């Protein structure tokens, strides 16, 4: 009996190829949005410039000319870096570094595993790049984040209104 390669079971598709496809489609009208009609990922993202990220509440930015740089040093100088487990992280695509709260489109179901849902508007959610990065492939992240938020609110409430 042939030995099963477990690694092949993890992802049925080549994540690199899928990521490349997503990159190449950024200015093509590939998303059929119920409100915006046929729209490119880039134009879709642009609609959310200046709006708060639904997860961290920070104002999102859009426009690569203003909100990205090719220099890692310049990115750090602009304060693009953020701390993840004691290490400085930067939003990076290719050799370009982006603002931490740059608008990004998150795939609820990972695009490498569900490539047929890559441009499905129901599978897309807008959030800042940093949150998208922190979320990674963890579908429980959003729930955990909501729970933390409610927990914080509850504690804040208890501080303000001490039980009689
Ligand atoms: Zn965010």
Image (spheres, helix red, strand yellow):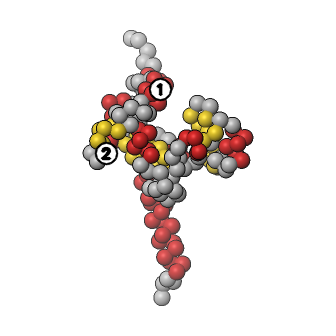
Identified at 70% across, 45% down, the residue is 76
Residue 9 or residue 12, whichever sits in front: 12
Coordinates of residue 14 in the picture (x, y in percent)? 45, 23
Q: Secondary structure at mark 1?
A: helix
Residue 83 or residue 151, whichever sits in front: 83
Q: Residue furthest bottom?
A: 164
Q: Secondary structure at mark 2?
A: loop
Q: Which residue is mark 2?
A: 36
Residue 144 has which mark? none
Reading the chain from its start, which is encountered first: label 1 or label 2? 1
| Residue 64 in view in this figure | yes
Tag 2: Cα neighbours inside 10 Å, few (<14), some, or many (≥20)?
Answer: few
Q: Is residue 144 above or below residue 135?
A: below
In the rendered picture of this protein, how many numbered marks are placed on residues?
2
Q: Is residue 45 above or below residue 145?
A: above
Identified at 29% across, 48% down, the residue is 35
Front label number (1 vs 2): 2
Coordinates of residue 51 in the picture (x, y in percent)? 46, 56
Residue 37 or residue 161, whichever sits in front: 37
| Residue 15 in view in this figure | no
Identified at 44% across, 58% down, the residue is 146
In which quadrant will I find the N terminus?
top left
Q: Which residue is mark 1?
A: 20
């Amino acid at each position: 009996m042939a030995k099963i390669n477990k690694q092949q079971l993890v992802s049925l598709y080549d994540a690199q190829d899928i990521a490349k496809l997503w990159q190449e489609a950024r200015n093509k009208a590939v998303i059929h949005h119920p409100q915006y009609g046929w729209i490119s990922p880039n134009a879709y993202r642009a609609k959310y410039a200046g709006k708060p990220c639904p997860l961290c509440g920070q104002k999102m930015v859009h426009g690569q000319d203003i909100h990205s740089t090719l220099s890692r040093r310049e990115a750090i100088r602009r304060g693009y870096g953020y701390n993840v487990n004691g290490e400085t992280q930067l939003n990076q695509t290719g050799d370009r570094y982006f603002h931490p709260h740059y608008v990004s489109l998150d795939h609820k179901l990972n695009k490498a595993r569900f490539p047929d849902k890559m441009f499905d508007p129901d599978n897309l959610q807008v959030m800042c790049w940093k949150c998208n990065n922190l979320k990674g492939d963890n579908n429980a992240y959003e729930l955990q984040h909501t729970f933390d938020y409610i927990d914080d609110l509850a504690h804040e409430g208890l501080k303000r209104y001490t039980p009689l």
